[in-house]
Amino acid sequence: MTDVTNGVLHTLFHSDQGGHEQVVLCQDRASGLKAVIALHSTALGPALGGTRFYPYASEEEAVADALNLARGMSYKNAMAGLDHGGGKAVIIGDPEQIKTEELLLAYGRFVASLGGRYVTACDVGTYVADMDVVARECRWTTGRSPENGGAGDSSVLTAFGVFQGMRASAQHLWGDPTLRGRKVGVAGVGKVGHHLVEHLLSDGAEVVITDVRDESVRRITEKHPEVAVAADTEALIRTEGLDIYAPCALGGALNDDSVPVLTASVVCGAANNQLAHPGVEKDLADRSILYAPDYVVNAGGVIQVADELHGFDFDRCKAKASKIFDTTLAIFARAKDDGIPPAAAADRIAEQRMAEARRG
């Protein structure tokens, strides 16, 4: 544990990826809960971010993911124009094996102990029904079911926002905001990805998909037999004639191995933390691949859960999420003006908003 602690402390206090305000390690032995809650910034308001339930290979990996995801939420919420800072929680373990009501209630008590500094919601491995349970112990819970005063599944507007980001990318690169006739590869067709596929097909795109879960693929191909299937992500990114690549699973999809062989001209997807390490954004730019920053285009879900705190209105949320189109275009314009990759341009805009909030 000493090495893990030293690694966490170095990241927090000495790394460019640090600067987090608070990190809470949570354990409830009776239920088997082991969780990490990371608050990156509350400059704009209470930290808002989902709860990821995942079988991490190590506690160190879990902490690192929580830190990265929390930092990403600060930037996402800033770019979405929300009065929220960034936070994230991860629960360590296989949700299909250890998720119980007792565990979720214990987790809710830990979130509640932060007194509103952190507002939680769904993420990978957690669902609306889980947030209903967490909310029984914690009023700072969003993403609940409509029956329990919530907004329901946030993946609907997450996918809608990614689609708006794709439209903006098409407008910037090809001069037309339609995906008609474009070949789009979607890696990960789970909660968000399958909604995204529906938008793409409705807009006339040619779609290729892949997913580690056969049932997720079948759900789409049985309804839409015209959708092609790639054997895996490695095959998908090498697909001939691919115009847009949409990573919609876990992070790190853009790395030293994938970027050199990527055939697409645009990357725009729902996954968080798509850039495996600093410098990948430049590698994309060097290959003339347009990157729509992940935390900008996938903000539809957080727009929805934030709205839930004030009395949810779907039409109001969809209108806000549709502005992702304009925000993405503004980032591309800033990148061109400053001579930097779009990811760096988005960071500058978000950091400016957070800095102004701190000064205020």
Image (spheres, grey):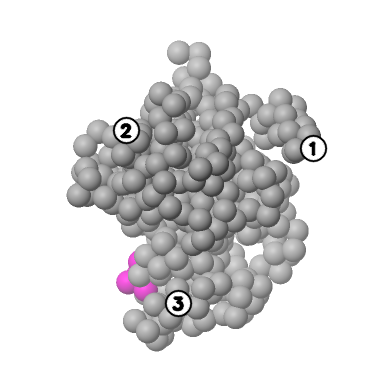
Q: Quadrant of residue 192?
A: bottom left
* Nearer the camera: disc 3 or disc 1: 1
Judging from the image, what secondary structure is the residue with disc 2 in? loop
Give the distance between the C-alpha atoms of the residues marked 3 and 1, in whole angstroms: 39 Å
User: Between tags 3 and 2, which lies in front?
Assistant: 2
- Is 150 situated left or right of 281 in this image? left
For label 3, the residue is: 215
In the picture, which quadrant includes the N terminus? top right
Observer able to see residue 150? yes
Indicate the amino acid at tag 3: Glu
**Secondary-structure class at tag 3:** helix
Point 45% across, 50% down: residue: 123
Name of the residue lying farthest toward the right = 3
Residue lying at 63% horizontally and 53% vertically, measured from the top left: 56
Q: In the displayed structure, would residue 50 be above or below residue 290?
A: above
Name the N-terminal-most of marks 3 and 1: 1
Badge 2 is on which residue? 139
Q: Which residue is mark 1?
A: 3
Q: Name which of mark 2 and mark 1 comes first in the sequence.
A: 1
Residue segment shown in magenta: 199-203
Hey, what amino acid is under mark 2?
Answer: Arg
Instruction: Give the residue drawn at x 51%, y 51%.
Output: 53
